[in-house]
Amino acid sequence: DAKTTQPPSMDCAEGRAANLPCNHSTISGNEYVYWYRQIHSQGPQYIIHGLKNNETNEMASLIITEDRKSSTLILPHATLRDTAVYYCIVRVSTGGFKTIFGAGTRLFVKA
Amino acid sequence: NAGVTQTPKFRVLKTGQSMTLLCAQDMNHEYMYWYRQDPGMGLRLIHYSVGEGTTAKGEVPDGYNVSRLKKQNFLLGLESAAPSQTSVYFCASSPWRGIGNEQFFGPGTRLTVL
């Protein structure tokens, strides 16, 4: 399974877009990119996933580069409640047991 | 729907004691998982199950046993607790749809072993 690289921390001003990058240069053709977040002491929360097309839902947008070696999670209007650790995970869609949570990116949204 | 629930929320054990953590889901999901999370680290998979009556080892299975007698429940057992098992334990479940299959997590159980 491909591994991912994320910056350890990022800051964002409230109301601005938060752009969280993820590198996954060894991703395989059948592997998806998943994003989860973990708000302090809570269980991780699923955000979005994609294979090669850009995806959008009510929480965020996922932009995957054409070569699929990197992606960006976009929170369009960050709020204080978006302060959390964000995990980028690469795995096949059927392999929930292959979900590897790394250290993630700690996003601080500031007023 | 309650989603994924975990019992208990907190527990303190002495070294050598045993206990069972209960995970329940009401979403009719096929897959269930147990993770542990140590301070400042990501989650690590302990055991998982792809269906009723089946279990498999994850990344860090030593010292733990699991059972899935009913589809909606996944039990994690510690036979002889050790201080190294002090951690926050998360249960998760996911459906089988062919694609996607995102995981849904419970609120966690905070375990301290003295």
Image (cartoon, coloured by chain):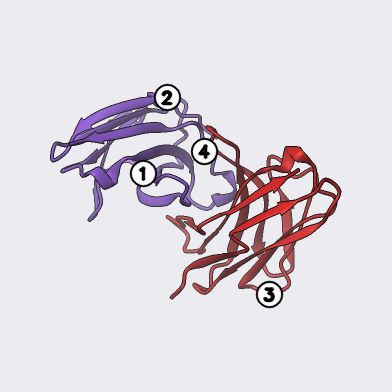
Chain colours: A purple, B red
Q: Amino acid at mark 3?
A: Lys
Residue A101's disc is 4
- Dividing the picture into quadrants, the one containing residue B53 is bottom right
Q: Secondary structure at mark 1?
A: loop
Q: Are marks 4 and 3 in contact (CB under 8 Å)?
A: no
Residue farthest to the left, as pictured: A15
Q: Amino acid at mark 4?
A: Phe
Discs 4, 3: same chain: no
Q: Secondary structure at mark 3?
A: loop
According to the image, label 2 marks what residue?
A: A25
Q: Chain of mark 4?
A: A
Q: Are marks 2 and 4 in contact (CB under 8 Å)?
A: no
The residue mark sitting in front, 2 or 4, is 4
Give the class, few, some or many, for how many residues have Cα within 10 Å of label 2's Cα (few <14, many ≥20).
Answer: some
- Measured as percent of width and height from the top left, residue A48 is found at 34, 49
According to the image, label 3 marks what residue?
A: B70
Q: Secondary structure at mark 4?
A: loop
Discs 3, 1: same chain: no
**Seen in the image, is A107 located left or right of residue A91?**
left
The residue mark sitting in front, 3 or 1, is 3
Look at the image and tell me in which quarter the N terminus of chain A lies. Answer: top right
Q: CA distance from mark 1 to mark 4?
A: 18 Å
Look at the image and tell me in which quarter the C terminus of chain A lies. Answer: top left
Discs 3, 2: same chain: no
**Seen in the image, is A32 located left or right of residue A96?**
left
Give the class, few, some or many, for how many residues have Cα within 10 Å of label 4's Cα (few <14, many ≥20).
Answer: many
- Measured as percent of width and height from the top left, residue A45 is found at 41, 52
Q: Chain of mark 1?
A: A
Residue at 43 percent of width and 25 percent of height: A5
Residue at 63 percent of width and 63 percent of height: B8
Earlier sequence position, callout 1 versus callout 4:
1
Q: Amino acid at mark 1?
A: Leu
